[in-house]
């Protein structure tokens, strides 16, 4: 059963539901509160990205699991669980439903299949060994979050429920998917006892030089009677946005937070948080457990050392009172159980 609803919170920064929402424009979408993200980051930035994609960084031992170990671990954990497949791609099992977030399992995050930001760590669980997927959730249209090859290759396009921000329905329809729900911010859909709500983020969208901000970008709340998860694919920091989310959800059991691709700050501050800002988001939304995302997978997205983000993330979380057991820096291919905790008041169908 699928049920949809859309309700914009009233108060500072949000329009009445009877008027056009503040993040809609005549030509597409924008951040609200307004932040102008860069349509182009400059020639030297992209030259550094192209040069960096040639080289593979040294990967620390334990950063990724073999496919055999990843599959064994996935199949050994019953109940709610989460697996990190790299970058912002997670397999989340909640209330018996398997959710795949921001699927990117191919080699290049690019409009071409032979160049661009390159994956340097295998996903742990390959496309052909994925378990049956019930729901696909997309945060935005950038290539490292919406991968054509992965989307085109998933099995059971008739059965998967696809949830996307406004403007991305056609991408999936053109690739054979049948059950596609587009949502504006604060719109929600319930699939088999799992409620998913599209929420604001500070970012932008594009897949070419001509479609900047033509499709919306979102964070997502994923809720069942036993667990609540905030998934952020990409975002700059906004205390107003994330405190508004907390006011509407009270708290989250888990928050999946992007911690990488934050340097240089003069270019990245408006669309990517630092590890310390990621922890601030977790505090803003009263998350119990913080899960690191968006790091250690793709070369040449930004200038910081590739394995710096988790050190800063863990240090900041500890300094802000989180216990080590509630700071999850997972290995690629790792699966962890998500113990249930009733900690919110949303309704379920």
Image (cartoon, grey):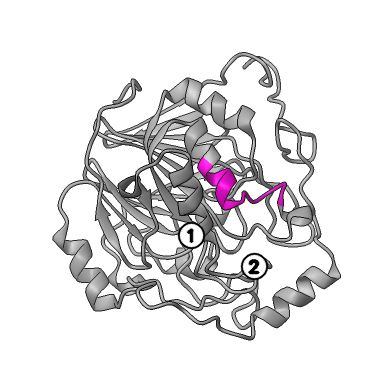
Q: Quadrant of residue 113?
A: bottom right
Query: Residue drawn at (56%, 31%), measured in percent from left and top?
Result: 242
Query: Residue drawn at (77%, 34%), measured in percent from left and top?
Result: 25
Q: Is residue 121 above or below residue 208?
A: below
> Looking at the image, which is closer to me, 98 or 276?
276
> Which secondary structure lies at badge 1?
helix
Q: Residues within 10 Å of mark 1 (few under 14, many from 20)?
A: many
Q: Is residue 239 left or right of residue 1?
A: right
Q: From mark 1 to mark 2, how far is it between C-alphas?
A: 16 Å
Provide residue 314's location: percent of width, then percent of height. Answer: 45, 53
Q: Residues within 10 Å of mark 2 (few under 14, many from 20)?
A: many
Q: Is residue 147 left or right of residue 292?
A: right
Q: Is residue 257 above or below residue 110?
A: above
Q: How many marks?
A: 2
**Is residue 294 at all visible to an observer of this figure?**
no
Mark whose residue sits in front, 1 or 2: 1
Q: Which residues are magenta?
A: 269-279
Q: Quadrant of the N terminus?
A: top left
Query: Which numbered circle lies on residue 301?
Result: 2
First in sequence, mark 1 or 2: give its number. 2
> On the image, numbered disc 1 is attached to which residue?
310
Provide residue 29's location: percent of width, then percent of height. Answer: 72, 39
Q: Is residue 205 above or below residue 345?
A: below
Is the C-beta separation of discs 1 and 2 under 8 Å? no
Q: Quadrant of the C terminus?
A: top left
Query: Residue drawn at (52%, 68%), measured in percent from left and top?
Result: 307
Provide residue 27's location: percent of width, then percent of height. Answer: 79, 40
């Amino acid at each position: 059963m699928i049920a949809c609803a859309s309700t914009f919170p009233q108060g500072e920064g949000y329009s009445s539901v009877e008027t056009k929402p503040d993040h809609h424009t005549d030509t597409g979408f924008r951040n609200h509160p307004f932040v102008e993200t860069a349509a182009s980051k400059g020639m030297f930035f992209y030259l550094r990205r192209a040069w960096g994609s040639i080289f593979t960084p040294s990967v620390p031992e334990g950063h990724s699991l073999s496919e055999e170990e990843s599959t064994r671990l996935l199949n050994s954990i019953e109940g709610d669980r989460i697996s990190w497949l790299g970058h912002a791609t997670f397999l989340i099992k909640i209330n018996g439903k398997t959710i795949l977030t921001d699927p990117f399992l191919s080699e290049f995050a690019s409009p071409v299949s032979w160049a661009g930001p390159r994956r340097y760590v295998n996903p742990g669980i390959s496309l052909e060994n994925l378990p049956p997927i019930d729901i696909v959730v997309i945060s935005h249209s950038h290539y490292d979050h919406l991968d054509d090859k992965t989307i085109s290759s998933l099995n059971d396009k008739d059965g998967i429920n696809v949830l996307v921000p406004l403007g991305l329905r056609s991408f999936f329809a053109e690739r054979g998917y049948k059950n596609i729900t587009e949502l504006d911010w604060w719109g929600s859909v319930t699939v088999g006892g799992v409620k998913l709500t599209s929420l604001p983020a500070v970012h932008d969208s594009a897949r070419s030089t001509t479609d900047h901000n033509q499709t919306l970008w979102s964070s997502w709340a994923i809720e069942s009677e036993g667990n609540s998860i905030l998934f952020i694919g990409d975002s700059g920091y906004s205390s107003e946005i994330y405190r508004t989310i907390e006011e509407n959800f009270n708290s989250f059991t888990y928050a999946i937070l992007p911690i990488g691709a934050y340097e240089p700050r003069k270019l990245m501050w408006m669309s990517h948080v630092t590890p310390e800002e990621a922890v601030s988001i977790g505090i803003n939304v009263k998350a119990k457990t913080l899960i690191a995302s968006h790091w250690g997978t793709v070369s040449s997205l930004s200038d910081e050392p590739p394995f710096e983000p988790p050190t800063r993330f863990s240090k900041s979380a500890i300094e802000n009172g989180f216990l080590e057991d509630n700071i999850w820096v997972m290995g690629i291919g790792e699966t962890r159980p998500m113990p249930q905790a009733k900690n919110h008041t949303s309704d379920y169908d």
